[in-house]
Structure formats: C-alpha cells, structure tokens
Amino acid sequence: ITHNSRVHIVIYHCNLTINLIKMLASIVTGILYASAATGATAETAKRCTGDCLRATQKYGSPRMYGVMEEKKIWWTKEAAEGVIGSTDSTGPAACVDGDANGYPCSGVDLQSMVSLADLGCGGQGNDIWGWTDGEGNEYVVAGCADGSSMVDVTDPTRPVVLGFLPTETVASSWRDMKVHEGRAYIGSEAAGHGLQVYDMHQLTALSAQYRASSRFDEDRTRNVTEHGHVNLGNTLSPTTVYKEFGSSHNIVINEETGFLYAVGSKTCAGGLHMVDLSSPDDPQFVGCYSDDGYTHDAECVVYTGPDSEYSGHEICFNYNEDTLTIVDVTHKDAPMLLSRYGYEGAQYTHQGWLNPEQTHLMMDDELDEQKEKSLDGHTRTMIWDVSKLDSPRLIGNFYSSEQSIDHNQYIHKGWSWQSNYCAGLRVLDASDLSSGKSSEKAFFDVSPECDTAVFSGTWSNYPYFASGNIAVQSIEKGLFMLKPTF
C-alpha cells in the first residue's frame, strides 16, 4: 500500500468515526428533546432553579416597574371617584347614525354589556379570552382584579355567568389567560399566584344543567336593565396550579405545539418561561430564554413564512420593552436569538400580531402616545416586514384620528382587532401589510367619557368565535359582546 493510500484510509476512518459520533450525538439529543416535549415524571421533572430564577427588579424590569406604578395610581384615582363598576348591564342596541345606546360606533352593533357586578368582579376588569366547546357553545374567560368570570355567551344578547374562579392568592389589576385543549391557563401579577389550570369542559355541564332547569325559561324574559344579566353564583376551583413561577404578566400558548410561554415572571430574567402542556392537567417546566431580559408579550408559532431556513421551526416574536426580538425556540434547552431590532420613538414595546402568511406583523408601543410629542396623543400602529427573520424592518405606520393609548391587538380574517383604551375597539385593515399602510374600517367606543391618552377603557378583546361575535373587556365597565356588521 502506498503512502498516499495509507493517508486516504486514515482520513476515511477518521471521517467515519466523526460521522458516527455526530449520529450518536443527534440520537441522544433527539431522545432528550423528546423527553422534554412529552412531559416528565415527578422524579425527573425539570425545576426552575439557579439561572432560571434571575430577575433583579421588583417587576423583573425597571421600565415595567414604572409603568405599573403609574397605572396603579390612575386606577386608584378612578376607584376613589367611583368610576370603576358604576355602569349597569345593558341589552342589545344597533349602531344607528354612529350611536348604540350612547356608545359611539361604526359598523359594529352592541349585543350586550355585562357589568363588573354581574360578572362577579370585586374590582376592575382586565384581560379576556374565549373557548368553544364540542357542541359549538361559546364561552368567555373575563379577567377581574380578584379572579376570572366564566361566561356562556352562546346567546350574546343574554350572556349567563356560570361561575367565578377566585384569584389564587391576592387581588391584582393584572391577570392574563389563554385556552388550550379545553383548559384555561391563568396567570397574574398577584404575588405567589402561579399558573391556574381550569378544565373548561365543566362549563359545558353547568350550562346544560342551567338550560334544562325551569329557571332558564323564566330568565328569557328577564329585564336586563332592571335586574342585570344572569349570574348562577357558582364558585369554581382550579384543576391544578403550576408553581414553577409565582407572578407573571402574560401567558402565551402555541396551540399547534402545545407549549406555553409565561412572560414577565420573576424567573428567566422576565423572559420566556417555557412549559410543556402535552399533559394538559400536569404542566411541566422545560426551559428558559433570558438572554434579552424582560419580555412583555409574545406570539409563538410554527413557522410557515418565506424564510425557508426556518421552515417548521417554532419561532417566538417577542415584544421586549424597546425591541422586537425574534427567537427560535424549537429546542427548549438551546433557544437561539435570530434578531433584535429597535425603532425610532420607542417608549414601551408592548404587543403585536402576525398576519397569516407570517410575512408581516402589526405592533404597538404602549407609551409613545403619552411621551412622543410628535404624536400629540394619537394612536400609532407600526407595520413590520418580518419576511427575513434575521433582519425585520419597520416599513410603515398607521396614525389614528383618535387620541388614545393602544394595548392588545389580534389579526383575524384580514382585520386587526385592536383594544385601544379610551378609543375602544378599533378595526384596521390588515389585508395588504406589504404596502406599509392600513386604514380604519369600523369601531365601537366602550368609553365615550374619555378621549385622551390615559389608561381607561378597553384592555383586550377576543375575535375568534365562529359566530363572528367579538368579546371586549373594559376596565371600568365589564364585558361587551359586539357584532360587526361590515
């Protein structure tokens, strides 16, 4: 054998050995990832310890601390003035000549308003989400300072409050919820709260029992103006409570993968606290993303957009106080930063939502209306091109005629459904975001008494019911059930 032949043989065997090592490493990684993704026994479950617990500020963020303290002062003032909870429930009213029973509107009818008192709230309202059971009945989880009100809104003109799930510890102005596999997952800024898990299928049984009772027929003729909406008075209990974090600011769920991401907790430096929901009643901690610090809100998806390098990956679009931060979280033990971009006039990057093609998103900054003089209080919605995940670009802005802070928005069926505090529900065209432009199609103002950039009005909305009904939660008034007519 020649010298060159010996060299080639040695190189061949070295390459073979390296390939075998890579293959074995890949197999081991796959086994570990599969284990993390399919839950764990009590003996092997990961715990949020060590680095996971990093959060140096009172709220995990000095910016968040300032914002929350400012809001507390405002809402304490509203409570002292009797603004919170002073509005009675109402029934349906069509939007005629820009008015629906005293509420300014365009292209949206009022079907009902369930007051904070009828919801069972012992304080102000906050966030909201929805769920549809296997029979097509529609339900709302309406957040309150002291818990969550569970409401059957199948007949949106006569909602029925089925029960109230109290806060796990103490009251808090902040509560957030999402629903996955028929379970509501509820977090709060209340100290030591954890993540409540409530089996929503119990609501189907409560609703069926009520509809079969003699009371149901009597309530159909109930005078809502005089007696309010029906509240069955049930006190509900969580199925379980996940305790790997105490307080949290928002709950994010990728329903396609079954992973939950708590953000703004006192863990993971306030970033993504990742939880496996493959066993819905037994959530398991699987990892952190903390490299960019505090995350205020996020949307996590299985990526199907145009950046082919990441096709099929799980990608989180994070709203991190002063940046849009995009992270690949496919491997929970090794999440990878793809990009981190700021923008001119950033005051507090709050929340946003992707279009269905995952090429663009609409984003809001919660404080720019107050702090950027050039806006003069007018709501700004930013339009981003995210077709390249490593280099997102701000390509345009929509400026509202209204003076109001923006809050939560969701893109659905070509429209962005925005809850913008004093301006109420605003509906923007999201059908062609590549132009960097949008326009307003419709609105329903749940707080006609305020028209400035303050923290009054609507907190959030849920636009995903098959019926087309939109649920909107108001801080001071309660739950609005609305019907678009455009």
Image (tube, rainbow, N blue to C red):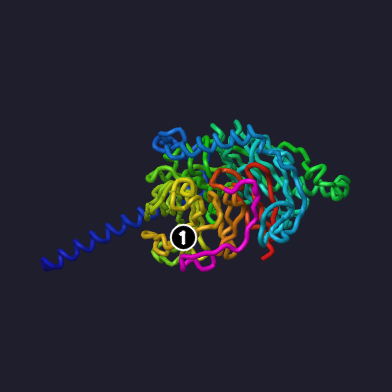
Magenta highlight: main SS: loop
**Amino acid at dot 1:** Asn
In the drawing, does residue 9 fall left or right of residue 143? left
Residue at 61% from the left image edge and 46% from the top image edge: 450
Assign the N terminus to one quadrant of the image: bottom left
Q: Which sits in the foreground, 13 or 77?
A: 77
In magenta segment, residue 449: yes
Assign the C terminus to one quadrant of the image: bottom right
Asked if 50 appears above or below 465 in the picture, the reply is above
Q: Is disc 1 placed on a helix, strand or loop? A: strand
| x and y percentages locating residue 430 in the rendered image | 54, 64
Is the residue marked by circle 1 packed among few (<14), some (14-19), or many (20+) residues within 10 Å? some
Which residue is disc 1 drawn over?
397
How many badges with numbers are in the image? 1
Point out the residue furthest to the left here.
3
Q: Which sits in the foreground, 470 or 439?
A: 439
| x and y percentages locating residue 335 in the rendered image | 40, 50
Residue at 73% from the left image edge and 60% from the top image edge: 96
Q: Is residue 185 something that shows in the picture?
A: no
In magenta segment, residue 446: yes
Q: Which residues are magenta?
A: 430-451
Q: Which sits in the foreground, 419 or 356?
A: 419
| x and y percentages locating residue 233 in the rendered image | 76, 38
Asked if 110 appears above or below 47 in the picture, the reply is below
In the drawing, does residue 13 fall left or right of residue 198? left
Q: Is residue 480 something that shows in the picture?
A: yes
| x and y percentages locating residue 406 in the rendered image | 53, 51
